[in-house]
Amino acid sequence: MSAGIFRVCLVVVTAIINHPILFPWENATIPENEEEIIHKMKAHQEKLQLERLRLEEEMAKLEKAEALKQAADIGRQQNEDRLVLDLWSTLSMIIFLIIELWRQDYLDGIPPDSPGEEDDLASPRTTFQGIKLPDKVTLSHFYERCIRGTTGDAVRTREFVEGFVDDLLEALRSVSNRDSDMEVEDFIGIGSMYENWRADKPLLCDLFVPFTPPEPYRFRPEVWCTSKSVPLDLQGYGQIKVGWINEDSMGCICGKTKLGEDLLCLLHSKNNKMRPNSEMKDLLCFKGSTFLDMDQVMKWFQMALTRAWQHISHKYEFDLVFGHLDIPGSLKIKFRSGKFISFNLIPVVQCEDSDLYFVSHFPRGRPVGAPTSRTHWFLSFAVYERHFLKMITKALPENACHLSCLQIASFLLTKQNRLTGISGLSSYHLKTALFHLLLAQPTSNWGPGHLESRLNDLLGLLEKSLLEKQLCHFFVGNQKVPDSMGIPEVFRRAEPLNLFCSFVLQRSLYQKTIDSFYEMLKNASTLISALLPFL
């Protein structure tokens, strides 16, 4: 214990003795120049500061270089991704074009029936998602008893309507002012009644009534296929510009040369120059434009028909009334017995010197998807359609079934529209599909014994067109139409016109049309079987 205490005391004494303040070393000296030391320290500090700034600058450069490298890598990756995307887009477009070309080739080359197909009554064709259509015997029996009987009535109805319309138009000319009113030409019969495939009653005649303006006016048609870009809903339509017969000189030399102050034109004085008649322009054209207005023409036509009937009504023992207020050319002859005959007079404008006509209104009402513009007129190929059926009928076998197919399909469509309402499918689409088949099938396949097969082909082509939302116009852009038809070259060389383009723009209309089409196929057998016992 005492030894420990002694050791502690020894350590304390030793520390005190060795403390530098109490007993400084002999060789220890305090710097004499303190300011010099401070100066050196400041210089060293400034040097360190410069070194720090240099290092920070180098770090910034390194970070910037790294950022540029990363941006370059990202840009290179984006370019690679864009290149891959462009490659896939190009491949997709090529695949789409290949499929489209294959589809067109398939449509143009529908294979003919296999030998003995029409004689195999035990195994009828099953298409259309498993829906079975009536067999050959049922279809033939139905056609003979339900449809063929309307042919004789159609002929008598046509003859009566044509005689009356001749008298009505002659009366219209007599009550018109030739100097200011439009001039009416002879009517042209078009549609199913004149193509011999009208299937449903009442029998209804459609008649074109071409009209022209009085001198010195003329109509200048402008069709859609002469423009570079036209909206889808305006394809198949055109405008009619009202102008002078000779707009440059107006038929007088004073419009081509300066006569001078001393000379005066005996026809046109300075204060009496030829100008468009304001009343005529208001009657013909849309307000503020030089394009023919459909509503103005329809009002004029309705008033002209009323005056003409008042002029000749005393000669007839029946009444003539308008069938629909919104369709001015829809007329109905009412007999005292209660019977009536309906027909449509449609004012039209001829397109140049062809058999094409601009239609002022549609006899069955405005179709779905038609433009609402009052200056865009529908261009009708109805006269060419009638000529084509006449020409192709001469090349087909006797009693060919092409019109029978169209009549049955039109009959089914009409009945279905009465059940579920109007859809986007019309009898014009049926006729267009038939025209394509007539050129695709050999003439020998249209004999009377091929009715079932050809009807299946017709409805099959229509189904395919509906699923693809594409049914091409038969005359526009179709190089297979015979040259003897005389279609104007501007329409033969035009891009094909899709009659189903409205389905691309209106999904609800397309779905309703598809549902209505398959419902029509399902009801076909039941409807035909139900009608036969009552006839």
Image (cartoon, rainbow, N blue to C red):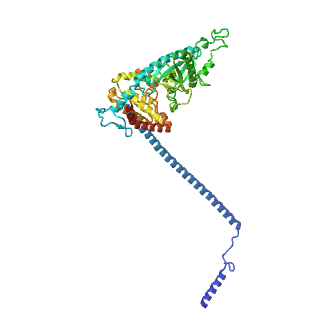
Where's residue 525, x and y in %? Answer: 38, 36
Measured as percent of width and height from the top left, residue 10 is found at 63, 86
Q: Is residue 510 above or below residue 225?
A: below
Note whether 409 is above or below 63 in the view shown: above
In the image, residue 361 lies at what x, y percent?
Answer: 52, 26
Number of numbered discs visible in the structure rendering: 0
Which one is in front, 11 or 355? Answer: 355
Q: Is residue 12 above or below residue 79?
A: below
Q: Residue furthest bottom?
A: 2
User: Residue 38, position in %: x, y?
Assistant: 69, 65
Q: Nearer the viewer, residue 178 or 14?
A: 178
Q: Quadrant of the C terminus?
A: top left
The answer to whether residue 105 is visible is: no
Q: Give the quadrant of residue 17.
A: bottom right
Answer left or right for 300 relative to 445: right
Which residue corresponds to the image point at 62% horizontal and 59% vertical from the top-left? Answer: 52
Give the position of the N terminus as an image quadrant: bottom right
Judged left or right of residue 165, residue 256 is right
Which residue is nearer to you in this view: 531 or 304? 531
Give the quarter of the image for residue 451: top left
258 relative to 89, above or below: above
Asked if residue 293 can be seen in this view, the reply is: yes
Answer with left or right where residue 135 lies relative to residue 218: left
